[in-house]
Image: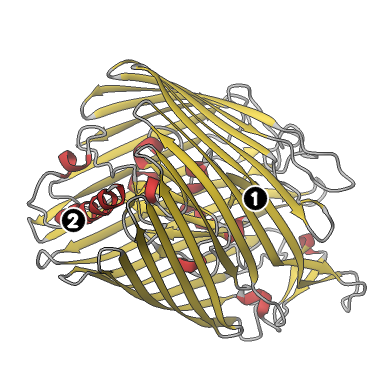
Amino acid sequence: MHARRDTAAICLAVAMAWAGTAWAEEPVGERRGRAGAGEVRTLSNVVVTATASERDAGDAPASVSVIEGEALRARPVHDLADAVKGTVGVGLDDVGLGRRGISIRGMSSEHTLMLVDGQRISTSASAIAHSDFELGWVPTEAIDRVEVVRGPMSSLYGSEALGGVVNVITRSATDRWQGSVSAYGLVNDHGLDGNQYKSGFYVGGPLVPGRLGLNAWGEYRYRDALRDAADPAFTALDRNRSTTGHVGLTWTPDARQRIDVSASAGNEDLDGVRGTSAAPYSADNQVQRRRYALSHAGQWDWGDSQVRLYRSTLDREAGRSDGADATGPNRFTDTVLDGRIGFAAGRAHKFTLGAETRRESLEDPSVNRAGKKSQTHYALFAQDEIVLGERWELVLGSRFDRHEDFGWETSPRAYLLFHASDALTFKGGAGRGFKAPTLKQLSPEYESFAAMGGRGVIRGNPELQPETNQSFEFGASYDRPRWSAGATAFHNDVRNLIETRRLPTCDVSGRTCLVYENVARARLQGLELTAGATLSPAWRLDANYTYLDARDRMADTRLPDRSRHRANATLAWTPLAALSTRVRVEYIGSQFRSATESERPGYTLLHWYVDYDVNRNLSLHAGIENLTDKRLANDDASVYGRADEGRRYFAGLTARF
């Protein structure tokens, strides 16, 4: 009976979502639960990324974490890296120049697929060194929730989902007008600048009740350059200024159909001073993002359907005051047409079938003589959600990708769930993921003289093969009204990792020649623990811990720049209905660097926040981040890769209407 209740709950969730498209029906605030006056909040136990349809998080055939947008708007969040920081199994890579990437279970940040509402976005890290430009596509004010799937998801999403998926779910128009405005300031206390300011808005509601809805959002954020403590003439973190805007329309011609059209635009400027004291130079990056989407969804007597056409572009102009190669300009374009249908076959099977075609193009002066290269990808996928008796469920799926250079790539996945009781669930599965080499890596004409800070020459290799990951995991979760706990063991066997290798000789005088090769094999395995408890009506404790054993199987050494131990904990106290405060602790364990360098020491960061609801429409937020003033690379650049701003004071507000 339990499995039947779960199936009924899923069907009810889908029906409620479709009811939400009829704007005049029951108030969304009452249907989904009020997080604050006028604040629409999607139920935290509903996720879509693991199966491409709505499911309860406890029944998701994957390891999924959900970060609520409301929680993000109550603390300073500069970009998506700040949003997911502290999530179990997730780390932030140092990608150079003070920038970060999102790493899942120790995999490279380039193995994390970024989605917005289930749609791919153009990623720049595939062609630009030290790039984190994919972290700024959606402002905090527009986020309903962020879903993080840990483990390969190529069975649904194809290439790039080798390590996992981060899916940003945006807020959508409802049956009544509502909106919010938020702003914050963040001030550092040590005189090296790096102060931040951000403001944003969201508004959504019916233009034609029951038929046409509108949502719109915008954001402006600014961060002063953080000056280098050793030499304030240089910058440890770039000055950053960004503006983002979006408008979307939802049309429901009848109770069965929904059509969405949207356009998003963003501009970001980054500049800093680098080099040596004898030869300093300023570097500037101007990034322009655009995203357009059109989709149709239908709910029919036989099942449901979805068709989407969307395009994302990222343009980057770069310059250096010393006239050296700035590896640009670059233009990344992804155009995707996909569709899927879902239907039940009897009482035990729910099938999802789909297809996708994707045109990926890169304009870059170094990729080949023409300065432009593109590829077309084709894919088919199938998934079967099978009810095996009252307490068992099996999810089988596979995707078949057609790559111009490699032919067909198959990504199967199987996941089994067992509900031992209403509170206790066991689940585990196996899957295969892949990541195709980038357009630059495969191009026989690609040649860049910007490698190794201008000392090296790197060239493409058309003989490269896709990177692969064979993954296994097993977990258990126990969920009671006052407390919950979970544990998941995982194992990733990664092969054909692409690395750069120095050639013994170089045909360019005074330079070092580099080449891309499939040379690496790695094993990443570990344990993830989560727990939460309501200690009393006023006190709540949540914590997670990740153990990671990451080894280079070729050299039989630990993989560098990965912590074996990570832990996060938040203790919240609500003495009054309108007043709450919380303390958050982050522990990052020591990291292996190389056989000739000592380990990078672990460290602990401590943060404190307080929130006060002035009334049902206005909330105030304040806090102190990094209470113990750990400045990392700004105190010891020989050990740490990225500078932290140090102790900083935060004040902000959220107004809802």
Q: Position of residue 310 (x, y in %)?
A: 36, 71
Taking the image as shown, residue 66 lies to the left or right of residue 490, namely left
Q: Is residue 344 above or below residue 539?
A: below
**Element at label 1:** loop
Please state the horizontal and vertical placement of residue 187, each as a whole percent of the image: 51, 28
Q: Secondary structure at mark 2?
A: helix
- Residue at 17% over, 42% down: 31
Q: Compare residues 444 and 377 and report the one nearer the observer.
A: 377
Residue 254 visible in the displayed image? yes
Q: Residue at x 74, y 41 (%)?
A: 591
Residue drawn where x is 44% and y is 60% of the image: 115
Q: Is residue 78 visible?
A: no
Q: Is residue 177 left or right of residue 518?
A: left
Q: Which residue is mark 2?
A: 15
Q: Nearer the viewer, mark 1 or mark 2?
A: 2
Picture coordinates of residue 125 (x, y %)?
60, 62
Quadrant containing the C terminus is top left
Of 179 and 525, nearer the camera is 525
Vertical placement of 402 versus 582: above or below? below
Q: What is the three-letter code of the residue carrying label 2?
A: Ala
Alpha carbon distance from label 1 to label 2: 38 Å
